[in-house]
Image (spheres, rainbow, N blue to C red):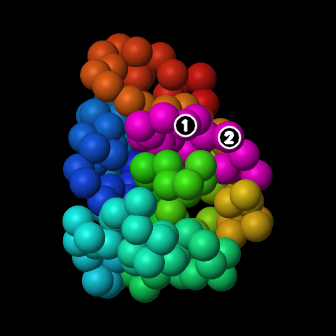
Amino acid sequence: MSKTLVAYFSATGVTAKAAASLAAAVAGDLYEIKPAVPYTRKDLNWQDMGSRSSLEMKDPSSRPELADRDANIAAYDRIFLGFPIWWYTAPRIIRSFLESYDFSGKTIILFATSGGSGLGKVAKELSSSCPTAVLKEGRLMNGRLSTEAIKQWAEKM
């Protein structure tokens, strides 16, 4: 049986709830990806093109610093990686996370929360940040999903 990690970034708590539900459903360990400098409400104002999140998302080379690098990736075979969709893709901190560890031979399954867009081409976009992993496009985890529904989806992955 493979060991499972549910790693996630959540700016407002929505993705954290989805990650907790997923970890419970798959009996996985939970790891929060945290920025070194937490995001404020002002930082997350997508209508302000000068906000921190807007500036990061406009710059493809942006890699926000992580608060820690404590995830024991070597201990896991399967990693569910969750995040909110920002500007139709993953927040730049997800690349910071992926580029900070060796994912050789690991299976990474994406999941996301979003107020209006889907996963789009996120898996393809992120593949360059973890080229030695098997990266699978997952699903949106918006709203209240039953433990059974989450379990059934995760088993197919």
Which picture quadrant has residue 145?
top left
Task: Count numbered badges in the picture.
Answer: 2
Within 10 Å of the Cα at label 2, are there few (<14), some (14-19), or many (20+) other Cα atoms? few
Q: Which residue is mark 1?
A: 117
Q: Position of residue 15 (x, y in %)?
A: 33, 46
Q: Which residue is mark 2?
A: 120
Q: Position of residue 95 (x, y in %)?
A: 58, 70
Residue 115, compared with residue 133, is above or below; it is above
Can residue 117 be found in the magenta stretch? yes
Q: Amino acid at mark 1?
A: Ser
What residue lies at 47% left-to-right and 17% top-to-bottom?
152
| Residue 88 visible from this viewpoint | yes
Q: Nearer the viewer, residue 122 or 75?
A: 122
Question: Quick check: 135 left or right of 22?
Answer: right
Please give the range of residues in magenta: 109-124
Within 10 Å of the Cα at label 1, are there few (<14), some (14-19), or many (20+) other Cα atoms? few
| Residue 93 visible from this viewpoint | no
What residue lies at 58% left-to-right and 35% top-to-bottom?
118
What residue lies at 44% left-to-right and 52% top-to-bottom?
83
Q: Amino acid at mark 2?
A: Gly
Can residue 10 be found in the magenta stretch? no
- Describe the element under mark 2 as helix, strand or loop: loop
